[in-house]
Amino acid sequence: MIGVLIATLIAMILYVVGMIITLSISKLNASRVMKHGLIILVIGYLTTGIIFYFAIPAITVPNMLLANIIVAAIFLPLFLYVIQPGKKVETSVMKPIVLFFSVGFIALIVIIVLGFTTLDDAHQSISVTEEEEAKPLTKDETPITVAPEFARNKIQKAMSVVPNPQFYDLGKLQVQKVEEEVVYVAPVEFAGFWKFLRGKETAGYFTISATNVNAQPEFHDSAMQYTNSSYFHKYVKRVIYNQYPQYIQSGEAQIEIDEDGKPWYVQTIYRPMHVTNKPNLNALKVVVIDPTSGDMKMFETNEAPDFIEGSVSSEMATTENNYFGKYIHGWLNSVFGKRDVKIPNASGSESGVTPIFDENGEMFYFTDLTSPKENIDSALGYTLIHARTGELTYYNGEKNNGIMDSEGAKQIVNKEFPEKRWEGYMPVLYNVDGNPTWVVNVLDPNGLHKQYAYIKANDSDFVVFGDTANQTLDAYRMALLQNPGNVGATDGVELETRSGEVDRVLVTSSEQGQIVQYLLSGDTTIYTVNASKAPLAIFLEKGDAITAEVQLLDNGTATVEEIEIEGLSE
């Protein structure tokens, strides 16, 4: 309650000033003025305190100034009427009160204007690096190939395993790496006020794989009293507010699981810049709260306990993307000139961004950026925001020029199955063998997973569909190899030299041309070469000695860029 009491006290300042002015200047009986002024002060304090208890306004200059103006505008006229009912307020009293109100309004306008001008400072507070392109997708990276809609649908069907399921609903899904597996974590939340009064505590949480569409949800029994759906003093946001009322909370607290399977609520918070409510994106904090006891501790986001993947919330990542793309030259430019302005697409799975994990197991938020000009569906690059540090990496190399954006990738999927009404969800851009590639989930109208789509980002006609992520990736790589126009697929990728004696050869034909696959003696790697790159390869025979420049893939295969065949090649 301390945060509410302090905020309410600050909100009464302008009223108290008006009451003191009246008491000092008015010719009315001082004791009567004081008596009524204190009565209305108590009423105003209680009324404002109740409102603040539910509204939970952070103690910042803009919030408190606005609160003072509203409180004074309601209770000062009431006070002036009560001390002299039915009569005109004394001019000597009215003038200074109006002056103070005017100053308050002018200050509020100034702060609003400063809020816009501070957007440039907020943009400058972002830690940014730029790179040409991401590293190619490898087997050590973990694409989140299960759409949250599909995961939620599966968990909803499993709610019957929860004790007294009529008391609960499913909470916000959060991606996390638990025991080296990427999973969605979803807390069980109260279904309403009366359920909270009767249940007193929630039953636990669900986990389900974020990379395997065939996985089933698992319920974990872990009672929680302090949650996002609790009321009064057990509401997580209010508990944090009472201890850190001067901080602004970003989005809804999310659940994360430690090494022992215990859930914790995690909330990103920040102190605003200057006298505005704009965040300093280089000074974010995170509060970790025990949902059983309500105990909490604040950390720098990059110093949070190791089990926490997303100490920077998805909502804050979305804000960071907006500031990075729109306010590169300040607020005025974002409205009028729009020079270098980039608009983040809202195609992500969490608040407009999509979490992904790299080969080191670290989580990032992915977002692609597009032009502010209407009817433009090409991407201007994409960002990855580190989910613990908030550092933003912007990718805008030559290969990313002219590629379609995430909305365009979804539309390709949507147009493929109009009769079934299957739609694309959660598009993520990956580097597949040097090709920017959209990986899109295909879901039916009920949120059930149907297929994966791999779309070449600079060719809307190059699409491969499949039932599993790995099968679709392999088919996509084969399609890249078979495409004569894709001879530069591996530009910039480090090649290896392989030589030996051919043990097996297979030549296949497709609409795109002939493909040669071979094995070398003592080597289980399947080597594949497009005859358009090496026409003499179709004459390969068992026993031929070859030397080739190859790109090794992560599925036991390799693509051949150059090949020399003893006796055939010059």
Image (tube, rainbow, N blue to C red):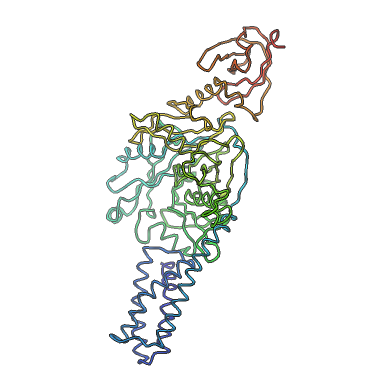
Residue 30 image offset from top left, x and y in percent = 37, 91
Q: Furthest residue to the right?
A: 570
Question: What quarter of the picture does the N terminus occupy?
Answer: bottom left
Q: Quadrant of residue 299?
A: bottom right
Q: Quadrant of residue 38?
A: bottom left
Up-down: is 363 above or below 513?
below
Decide if residue 269 is on the left or right side of residue 38.
right
Q: Residue at x 38, y 29 (%)?
A: 450
Residue 145 image offset from top left, x and y in percent = 46, 34
Question: What quarter of the picture does the C terminus occupy?
Answer: top right
Residue in front for this viewpoint, 502 or 369: 369
Up-down: is 216 above or below 316?
above
Residue 353 image offset from top left, x and y in percent = 48, 44
Residue 66 image offset from top left, x and y in percent = 43, 69
Up-down: is 140 above or below 332?
above
Decide if residue 113 is on the left or right side of residue 450.
right
Decide if residue 23 is on the left or right side of residue 135.
left
Residue in front for this viewpoint, 158 or 341: 341
Q: Residue at x 35, y 68 (%)?
A: 50
Looking at the image, how many numbered discs can be counted on the residues? 0
